[in-house]
Amino acid sequence: MGEDKLHKYYPHTEKILVAVNCIVFGFEAGQLKLLLLKRNIEPASGKWAIPGGFVNVDESLKTAGRRILNDLTGLEDLYMEQLHAYGDVDRDPGARVISVAFYALIKVNEYTHQSVEEHDAHWIQFSDIPDLIFDHNDMMDNALQHLRTRARYQPIGFHLLPEKFTLPELQKLYEALYQKELDKRNFRKKILSMGFLDKLDDKDKSSRRGAFYYRFNKVKYDELVSKGFNFEV
Amino acid sequence: MGEDKLHKYYPHTEKILVAVNCIVFGFEAGQLKLLLLKRNIEPASGKWAIPGGFVNVDESLKTAGRRILNDLTGLEDLYMEQLHAYGDVDRDPGARVISVAFYALIKVNEYTHQSVEEHDAHWIQFSDIPDLIFDHNDMMDNALQHLRTRARYQPIGFHLLPEKFTLPELQKLYEALYQKELDKRNFRKKILSMGFLDKLDDKDKSSRRGAFYYRFNKVKYDELVSKGFNFEV
DNA sequence: ATTTTAAGGTGTTGTTTTTACACTTATTCT
DNA sequence: AGAATAAGTGTAAAAACAACACCTTAAAAT
């Protein structure tokens, strides 16, 4: 799509820089974590920032998000949803930049850890989030808030856990999200009564007794939803 | 903010046209309605569209939304929230345009009707929505879906009603949103038990018996929220 | 003036969902 | 063998929800 077409149809209009930022959440050792980078371009080089970059004219917003996140951290195939467009005139002191924020959820494992480290990115837990550049602390707050409310009504928490997870792990995730302890019996009763978790034969042996693994069964879940089921934790 | 600054900090980056669209909802005669315009610029001139226009470099997204909506329809001071940024590369055949959609709620009355008519905009009820340009039908679907879920957990429905409204009116609004009949006694019990509606002394006399007016008391509502209350209808 | 009509307003009961709460079991470590 | 640790399990009381029918008010019609 060239300049000709642009001027033909929308003369006297001003173009603007468009960026995307990806707020990447991970869950590890009972802690919710955020992926941050030290920015390496001016202005604000060296300061902590949420991964981001500029959208090219020939790519969609989500494509740009995936490309930029891959460039900056090596991560790919994450669950990603658009969150909000940040458009205050002076939000970026370098230029007028509108940024579309996405939040992403990732199953943290050795491979992703390695990739993140090689790119000099860092997992920071929520009690230790530093001052971030521009409006990135706002983005982070909004994303966290959004994740909290959304996880209650959509089964997106499973994107933060490995394929095979235990019920105590799942409960710890929800406790981390809601910042509130949950009753073990009531939690298990509720989750299992929904009927889309498959109990596996093997156990996670990191505790003495060991806890059975479960798996999220998307086929069953979709079937239930099509019958009017509403997820809620 | 000039070109100098831009080139100093972010060289080799491509700027893009940024638009906003406002999905404006109204509620009248028991019907949820959408404000639409016939587009008067190319491409797709003469086709039905959601009101929209381009963002200037010196205004925020929301400011642009209010300015454009005011230009196109004369409306002002609406409740407005950002919804989603639409960024597919070919969504607008005229150029690469990213559009940030807002949804807006308005208390329809004689004054707003007049203003809308003078600008040749139209209130269309949901059963009669025509084919819209570009991805505007998607925007509308998303906005409606969003309104429905959001109205359940946030007291935003009151933005669609006059300051003084009756309980039968409020119930009709929720019935229109959920497309489902509600039990009069249970609805009244639930809404009134929340304790943020003030009953007024006068009645709406458009029915034989007349129904008492109520008013949403924001101070009481905020107080309840600060004590941990969660709105849900 | 009386009757009719249309919509507003009101409580109770059974069912379902949610919450609170304590002991047993499996396994590892010593 | 025994101690330690976390996993796993059931019940009862309380709260929320859903279903349901009649009386009241006031305008309109006769």
Image (cartoon, coloured by chain):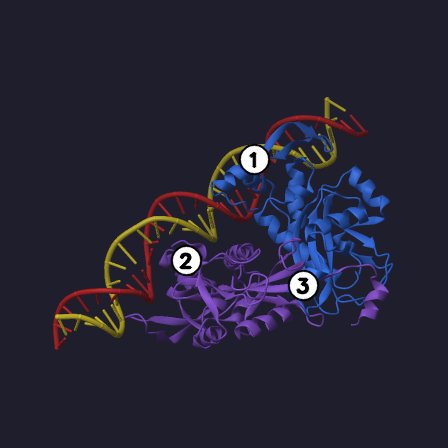
Chain colours: A blue, B purple, C red, D yellow
Q: Helix, strand, or loop for circle 2?
A: helix
In the rendering, which numbered label is found on residue B175? Answer: 2
Q: Chain of mark 1?
A: A
The one of B219 and B135 positioned closer to us in this rendering: B135
Q: Which residue is depicted at the point 65% across and 32% down?
A: A213
Q: Nearer the viewer, mark 2 or mark 3?
A: 3
The one of A37 and A77 positioned closer to us in this rendering: A77
At which x and y percent is residue B14?
77, 59
- Per the model, the C-alpha gap separating discs 2 and 1 is 32 Å
Identify the residue under disc 1. Answer: A219
Identify the residue under disc 3. Answer: B18
At which x and y percent is residue B198?
44, 71
Residue A24 visible, this angle: no
Q: Quadrant of residue B2?
A: bottom right
Q: Chain of mark 2?
A: B
Q: Which residue is depicted at the point 57% across and 71% down?
A: B69
